[in-house]
Image (tube, coloured by chain):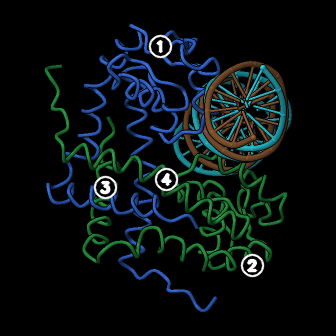
Chain colours: A blue, B green, C cyan, D brown
DNA sequence: GCCAGATTGGTTACATGTCAACAAACAGCT
DNA sequence: AGCTGTTTGTTGACATGTAACCAATCTGGC
């Protein structure tokens, strides 16, 4: 490899800023969420994904795919949430191997109670700080990066 | 709390995009780094921070502050890196409680060998995908968010 | 129907992070 | 000096993520 193209000042600022923002912003929003609702960030993601389904249920693998989680991670997390009564597992009617994750009434109540505060937190620490154009560009950046990651395999 | 101001379409796109980008982009860059150099992302961060010092050494607490890590996390990570010969601990001359983390020659070699590939990876999956303006805005966003997080305490 | 290979969900072993508690050392005040 | 409260780094108990493996089941070709 020849001498690499190091990051210039502006590029480095963006990269370092992204890294630090990721570290602190996510920690802050997770802390707010936990304090206000007793849910962890992953809890919220699972409940949110489940509640987006009309019948409140998902096959484990399908849910893992949608969330970009490993099966293993989701299986473990579901076990923990099951102990707290937020979700349950049911057998799948069409595939005896399958396990269907179902949002309980308690789980639905938990996400409904947590959502307003969570949105407020996201607004306070991110969205409401930015101009409309900055929000637009952030969306663009994410779209570009994600499309690129989906395309290449190397 | 009255009815919250839910995120509109554009805001939701930015927030969800940020979340997914964080998940996939970081995983991808970490995977490249590990494959090419055998270093984990935290390894790289520690080595990078240490090598930025003229004498290759930092007090543990100061290093933790700079990296925005907890003392506990850094202490544990240093122990693991010490076993691999990347860093060592020395006693502090001016404070008998203190522990000074020192980058070894092997550690310096590791970061020097890893850096070009890492920069290349960051370019390929992020920086080179974006326009100059988008890079600028990303830096702006991070600056705004980080300044805000630093200011408030609630 | 039967078999080879893929898929599904779970589990075990392990890596890594958090939190609380701790001993040792420091710093400021009297 | 002596006392008190703070700072420093480490550790034990625990929460949570990953990787490799496994048994059960499904699938498609024969």
**Residue at coordinates 63% horizontally, 57% vertically from top-left?**
B42
Q: Residue furthest bottom?
A: A2
Quadrant of residue B54 within the rendered picture: bottom right
* B145, A151: nearer the viewer: A151
- Specify which label sits upstream in the sequence, 2 or 4: 4
Task: Determine whether, in the image, residue A57 is placed left or right of residue A126.
Answer: right
For the residue labelled by badge 1, is the local secondary structure a helix, a strand or a loop? loop
Q: Is residue A61 above or below residue B25?
A: above
Pointer 2 residue? B109
Give the mark toward the camera: 3 or 2: 2
Residue A30 drawn at (x, y percent): 42, 35
Q: Are marks 2 and 1 in contact (CB under 8 Å)?
A: no
At x 77%, y 58%, the residue is B81
Q: Chain of mark 1?
A: A
Q: Label 3: few (<14), some or many (≥20) within 10 Å?
A: few
Q: Secondary structure at mark 2?
A: helix
Residue in view at x 29 percent, y 39 percent? A122
Q: Could you say which is closer to the camera, residue A56 or residue B39?
A: A56
Name the mark nearer the viewer: 1 or 3: 1
Q: Have a look at marks 3 and 2 and say if they share a chain.
A: yes
Rendered image quadrant of residue A103: top left
Q: Which residue is mark 4?
A: B24
* Vertical comparison of A58 with B49: above or below: above
Q: Which residue is mark 3?
A: B147
How far apart are labels 3 and 2 at the CA level? 35 Å
């Amino acid at each position: 490899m020849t001498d690499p193209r190091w990051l210039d000042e502006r590029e480095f600022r963006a990269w370092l800023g992204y890294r630090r923002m990721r570290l602190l912003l996510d920690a802050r929003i997770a802390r707010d969420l936990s304090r206000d609702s007793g849910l962890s960030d992953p809890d919220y993601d699972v409940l949110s994904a489940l509640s987006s389904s009309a019948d409140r249920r998902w096959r484990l693998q399908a849910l893992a795919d949608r969330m970009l989680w490993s099966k293993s991670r989701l299986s473990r997390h579901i076990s923990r949430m099951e102990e707290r009564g937020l979700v349950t597992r049911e057998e799948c009617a069409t595939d005896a191997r399958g396990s269907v994750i179902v949002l309980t009434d308690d789980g639905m109540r938990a996400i409904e109670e947590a959502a307003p505060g969570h949105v407020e937190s996201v607004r306070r620490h991110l969205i409401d700080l930015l101009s409309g154009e900055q929000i637009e560009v952030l969306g663009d950046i994410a779209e570009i990066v994600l499309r690129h990651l989906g395309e290449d395999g190397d």
